[in-house]
């Protein structure tokens, strides 16, 4: 909603960093506490807002019916909330408190009906809004229930069970609510309340507490215990890895035109973040992905997904791409959309292709020339015939000039929308299609990623799908240029002569043609093995000066990182280590 357009006033500027904020909160002896219960669907989308809309902030609200009392100083409804917010931050004459130590923060607990307490945060501001509603909160016109008061909360902690669901599900469905119900006993705050004999502390509506015993239970016996460095780091990692608002700003690089200067700029950006990739392959991939749909084919661990994501970010920015990981259970409903049963009635739910079309249309509406990227990871896991039938008809070739949304699909979605039995994405699709038709489709780019040892394996997913893409093979490395920089970065943990031995051993494995035909010693596997042995050295579990021991541990870490279960292949790698050590010893003599 606001992003970087709002800045913290003094003295709160010290609290912009989550770690600093939590450190300050740990020292607070007095706080105000409220609890905000609600439907699983409403909280799901409020948490998604913290990932898609405004990183680390969520929203909650109340209707006038549920908060009829009015704060006398401000005239705002939900007096309990507003007065505690005001009293904790303002002096008696309504002047702002200027000393952080004198502030009494207002903490909000997140409660999902039929599941329990799932997190908490710091309430930062309160808004009275008659004009707009948060788009995913259902209002009830017949009962005159409108969410007119809305407040913003800086998320401090969300239960890991909920974080898993937010990662697992892109959109809300009945499975989310069912899994939340089943997770009730695992939720940490629920468990702590049970241990304290207060498991019946269940809110019936938005409530702010005056009872000092309840405040003491929540603050001193529960919340403070969760404001640990480990929990803080896990929350920071969650928002760094799974929010779409990562470190890259909005981009519209194609506004300057498609030219050699742009290609070189993108090449330089990506090479700076992804080491060791062949420059000719990278240049071919960039050009192909800007012009049409691309399929990256190669062994696991070669950085294909990272490459696709880096290009999408560099070209189109934070909101310019989405990633979907394929699985064998995908149907037409997952890809295009289709009927589903929700809350006891049949409804049309949009698949990710409809959502991607809407995103591409939004970019057109906002004046962006750059495309919206749909990255489909591990496409080889999907049953292509079952899930991608209409995909073939829409994308007839890699070239956007040949793409066309079929009228039967548009008519189908339109009927569900007109009967008011379709999701919000479907309604937006009809609006966008009426305005942009196939122009928005032409602003979509699909990057499919296939894990396969070589191009010969593509028959497994069928020629019909392959013909829709420009196919680029990412081959298994036959030398060590992709990992040499990473190996050398292990100085000073590992002496130079030992680092050279590791590089020589990697090269020894990769140059073995017979072994290379059986297994790929991928970039990812090597880097993971290096990370493991470096950790062992740092904690004193591995002698970095003993070549045989060092290489043996590296070899074990490498085998466990390859994703190979064939004992025969693993034994062959062990045999190569023995041969290398004997050969290396002979060379030294």
Image (cartoon, helix red, strand yellow):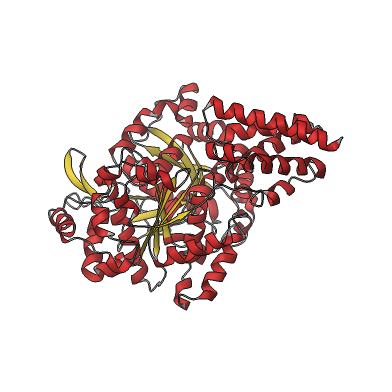
Residue 495 in the figure: left or right of residue 121: right
How far from the left and from the top, in percent, is residue 334?
29, 46
Q: Residue furthest right?
A: 589
Percent position of residue 51, x then y:
45, 51
Left or right: 348, with 310 as reference point: left
Task: Judge whether residue 318 can be spotted in this image.
Answer: yes
Number of callouts: 0
Q: Quadrant of the C terminus?
A: top right
Q: Residue furthest front?
A: 514
Residue at 30% x, 54% y is: 353
Residue 29 seen in this snapshot: no
Instruction: Identify which residue is drawn at 46% across, 23% down.
Output: 194
Q: Quadrant of residue 28?
A: top right
Q: Is residue 34 above or below residue 130?
A: above
Q: Is residue 146 above or below residue 223?
A: below
Q: Position of residue 58 (x, y in %)?
A: 44, 50
Left/right placement of residue 180 relative to residue 487 reads: left
- 161 or 506: nearer the eye? 506
Residue at image location 30% in from the left, 45% down from the top: 384
Which residue is most to the bottom? Answer: 256
Q: Quadrant of the N terminus?
A: bottom left
Question: Is 3 or 167 nearer to us in this picture?
Answer: 167
Front residue of 509/542: it is: 509
Horizontal side of 305 relative to 411 (left or right) equals right
**Percent of width and height locating residue 383:** 31, 41
């Amino acid at each position: 909603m606001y992003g970087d357009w709002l800045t913290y006033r003094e003295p709160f500027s010290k609290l912009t960093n989550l770690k600093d904020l939590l450190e300050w909160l740990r020292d607070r002896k007095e706080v105000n506490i409220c609890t905000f219960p609600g439907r699983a669907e409403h909280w799901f989308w409020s948490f998604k807002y913290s990932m898609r809309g405004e990183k680390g902030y969520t929203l909650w609200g109340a209707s006038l019916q549920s908060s009829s009392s009015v704060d006398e100083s401000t005239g705002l409804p939900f007096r309990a909330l507003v007065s505690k917010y005001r009293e904790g931050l303002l002096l008696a004459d309504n002047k702002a408190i200027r000393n952080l130590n004198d502030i009494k923060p207002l903490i909000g607990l997140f409660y999902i009906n039929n599941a329990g307490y799932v997190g908490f945060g710091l309430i930062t501001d309160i808004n009275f809004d008659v004009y707009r509603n948060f788009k995913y909160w259902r209002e009830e016109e017949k009962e005159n229930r409108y969410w007119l008061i809305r407040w913003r909360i800086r998320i401090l902690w969300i239960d890991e069970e909920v974080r898993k669901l937010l990662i697992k599900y892109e959109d809300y469905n009945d499975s989310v609510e069912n899994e939340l119900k089943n997770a009730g006993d695992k939720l940490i705050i629920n468990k702590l309340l049970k241990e304290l004999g207060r498991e019946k502390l269940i809110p019936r509506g938005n409530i702010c507490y005056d009872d000092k015993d309840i405040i003491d239970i929540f603050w001193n016996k529960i919340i403070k215990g969760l404001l640990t460095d480990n929990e803080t780091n896990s929350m920071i990692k969650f928002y760094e890895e799974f929010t779409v608002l990562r470190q890259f700003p909005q981009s519209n690089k194609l506004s300057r035109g498609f030219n050699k200067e742009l290609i070189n700029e993108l090449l330089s950006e990506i090479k700076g973040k992804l080491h060791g990739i062949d420059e000719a392959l990278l240049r071919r991939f960039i050009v192909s992905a800007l012009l049409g749909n691309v399929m990256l084919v190669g062994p696991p661990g070669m950085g294909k997904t990272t490459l696709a994501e880096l290009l999408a970010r560099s070209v189109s920015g934070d909101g310019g791409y989405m990633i979907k990981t394929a699985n064998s259970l995908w149907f037409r409903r997952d890809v295009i959309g289709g009927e589903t049963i929700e809350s006891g009635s049949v409804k049309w739910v949009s698949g990710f292709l409809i959502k991607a079309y809407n995103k591409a249309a939004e970019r057109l509406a906002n004046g962006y020339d750059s495309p919206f990227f749909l990255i489909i990871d591990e496409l080889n896991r999907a049953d292509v015939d079952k899930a991608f039938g209409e995909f073939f008809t829409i994308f007839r070739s890699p070239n956007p000039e040949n793409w066309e949304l079929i009228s039967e699909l548009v008519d189908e979605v339109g009927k569900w929308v007109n009967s008011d039995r379709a999701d919000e994405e479907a309604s937006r699709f009809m609006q966008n299609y009426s305005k942009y038709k196939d122009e928005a489709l032409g602003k979509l780019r699909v990057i499919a990623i296939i894990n396969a040892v070589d191009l010969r394996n593509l028959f497994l997913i069928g020629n019909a799908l392959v013909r829709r893409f420009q196919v680029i093979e990412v081959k298994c490395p036959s030398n060590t240029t992709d990992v040499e920089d990473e190996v050398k970065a292990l100085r000073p943990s590992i002496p130079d002569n030992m680092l050279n031995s590791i590089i020589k051993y990697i090269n020894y494995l990769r140059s073995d043609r017979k072994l290379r035909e059986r297994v790929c010693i991928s970039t990812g596997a090597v880097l993971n093995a290096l990370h493991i042995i470096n950790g062992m050295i740092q904690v004193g579990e591995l002698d970095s000066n003993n070549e045989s021991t060092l290489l043996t541990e590296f070899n074990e870490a490498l085998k466990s990182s390859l994703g190979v279960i064939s004992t025969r292949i693993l034994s062959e790698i062990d045999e190569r280590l023995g041969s290398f050590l004997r050969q290396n010893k002979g060379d030294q003599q």
